[in-house]
Structure formats: structure tokens, C-alpha cells
Amino acid sequence: MIELRDVSKVYGQDGREVAALRDVSLRVAPGEVFGVLGQSGAGKSTLIRCINLLERPTTGEVRVDGRDMMALGPRELRLARQGIGMIFQHFNLFSSQTVASNIAYPLEVAGWPRERIRERVRELLELVGLADKALAYPARLSGGQKQRVGIARALAPRPRLLLSDEATSALDPETTRSVLGLLRDINRQLGLTILLITHQMEVVKDICDSVAVLERGRLVEQGKVVELLARPGTRLHELCYPPLAARDWRVSPGGRLVEVNFQGESATQPVVTTMARRFGVDANLLEGSLERVAGARMGRLLFELTGAPEAVEQALAFLQEQGLSPEERAHV
Ligand SMILES: Nc1ncnc2c1ncn2[C@@H]1O[C@H](COP(=O)(O)OP(=O)(O)OP(=O)(O)O)[C@@H](O)[C@H]1O
């Protein structure tokens, strides 16, 4: 759906050059929710704006739906952009126009007949749960409602791709969850591909299928969220989970501190209990979490393993066989 190849963007500023993106290559598959995670200044906004060419890359290639965006003339580019919706952190609504007029705007620009616009706006208001707000002005809406209007407006011309520029950063946690839920529903119901940029790990864990981590203009990692989170040592895992063994645990002499990461089915099975029983070892649970990431169950446990040295080795091998990648932590 989206393919970036070696995209770099250099801004000229007061006679100085700022490299906002350096050789960024990524691929977003049709129908997925793809997140780009990065801190402030990492180059996220530049990256998302390079996709619909609001910003022109200095070098590299941008393909959307197989089309070479940088080769398009102004008219073709305008048409191509109608297939790419965008939502923003600060909603960017017209304050002097009603909710319905805001949503109708891109359809008027695209020259839709009035009757079809009316019908489409009604449909969209229904979709985003604002059927009773058609005639309200944005100032009367909550942040979450404003973003719903932004989403309806972006979806109006039936785009195949939605770009989200920190769409939930200005919202409280509960509203964030409800807006992310709406985006997930739209992704599933309409098969819409979504690329979002965010500095919030929660957003990635909540709705992204895949993620790329951007640091100082470079992509340092990309892959499936569940896979990266289940593998200690990946950047995503590091960012998401502070080291468990960084505390002063009271570990008995000869005890070994072990961390395991569970994913999917194994998260629901009592693997540690089975291990303890089968090998006659003790697993003293120190810390752990179980959560849902992109619809999959993920868990993480830190425990102290004690028993006969040989049995402990066998227990560790068993965890390895079960795909739990046990990691031994140093005692602090
Ligand atoms: N129009 C511009 N002219 C000059 N430099 C720019 C311009 N836009 C961005 N930059 C610089 O490019 C770098 C990346 O900025 P960008 O806004 O893409 O990062 P970001 O990850 O979106 O940050 P934030 O989350 O704070 O918005 C920064 O060093 C920024 O100062």
C-alpha cells in the first residue's frame, strides 16, 4: 500500500541544514494499522507528510498504491490525495462551520452533487456516533467529538489510506481509547489501511499491527508489534518494559533470576507451574504482567528459580522449548 525507499529529507534553516529523515525505507501492507513511534524531533511529522507529498523528500522514492507519487503532476497529485485521508492532533476543523459542513467540505471540493453529499454526511455522522451533532459548531464539542468529526471528514471521499498525525495526543486516556477503538473498527469494517505517527507506546500496543521505531531521522527497527514485544532485546521491548531486574530482590543463595515473555496461546497456559512440577524446581514469582496487545495476549514474568542445579538447567531448557526465550537477569 505504501512503500518508501531510501527517503531522506533535509531542511535548510538559517543557512544550516537539518536532516529530518535519513534513508528511511518502509513498507505498509494493505489493510494494516502501521505505527511510527518516535520521540519529539525524531522526524515523524516529516515522514507522514512525505507520504502525501505535503513535504517533498529531498531524495528517495514514495509509492502509494503502486503509484510513484513524486512523478505526478499537480492535477494527478490532487486526485491521488483524495484517496489519502488525514487526521491531525489539533483536529483542524473550520470553527465557523457546522459539523455537517466540515464533513461535507472535501466532497464539495471534489465536486460531488449536493444530494449525494447530504447522504454521505448522514452516513458518516452515523459511523462516528455523532448523528445528533450535525448542526453543532466545533466549539461546542469535546476533544473526542472533534476528532470524530475529523475522522468523518477524512473518510468522506472514501480514501483507501488514512494518515494519522498524533490524532490522540491532545486527548485524555479514556477518550484516546474510544477514538482508537473507532479507528480499529473502521480499519476492520472498511479494510482501510492506517498509518499513524505517535510518541505514545499505548497507541502502538492498542491498535497497531506493525510498527517502525524512528530515532533522529532513522528507522532503527520495524516489524509486527506482537513479535517485537515478545522478544527481549528489541528496541520496542526496551521502550515498553523497563528492566525488571533493576531492583533489590532478595534472591536466595544459588537462586537464579529468570525473565520470560509469553505471547498468544502460551500466555494462557500455566507453563511455569508445569515446569515446576515436572522438574521438581521452585519458581518464586517476583513480578509480572499480563495484557492484551493488538488483540493478542502477552505476558511477562520475573521469578527466582531454585532447585538442584541439573533440574534448574532442564527447567530452563523446557522454557526455551516452549518458545518463552527465558532470559537470565543478574542479581542486583
Ligand atoms: N519546515 C522545517 N524547517 C526546518 N526544520 C524543520 C522543519 N520541519 C521540521 N524540521 C526539523 O526536522 C526535525 C524533525 O522534525 P519533525 O517535526 O518531523 O519531528 P517529530 O518527530 O514530528 O517531532 P514532534 O513530535 O515534536 O512534532 C526537527 O529537528 C525539526 O526541527
Image: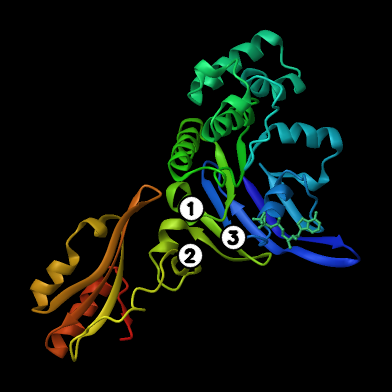
Figure quadrant, ligand 1: bottom right
Up-down: is 80 above or below 227? above
- Horizontally, residue 22 falls left or right of residue 241, namely right
Up-down: is 9 above or below 146? below
Disc 3/disc 2 C-alpha distance (Å): 11 Å
Residue 252 image label: none
Question: How is the model colour-coded?
Answer: rainbow
Q: Residue at x 12, y 88 (%)?
A: 308
Look at label 2 and name its amino acid.
Leu
Residue 141 at x, y percent in the picture:
56, 27
The residue where tag 1 is placed is: 204
Please tell me in which quadrant of the rendered image residue 98 appears. Answer: top right
Q: Residue at x 42, y 61 (%)?
A: 227
Disc 1/disc 2 C-alpha distance (Å): 10 Å
Q: Is mark 1 within 8 Å of ligand 1?
A: no
Q: Look at the numbered disc 2 and give the secondary structure of its residue.
A: helix
Residue 211 at x, y percent in the picture:
52, 56
The reply to whether discs 1 and 2 touch (Cβ–Cβ < 8 Å) is yes
Residue 236 image label: 2
The residue where tag 3 is placed is: 38
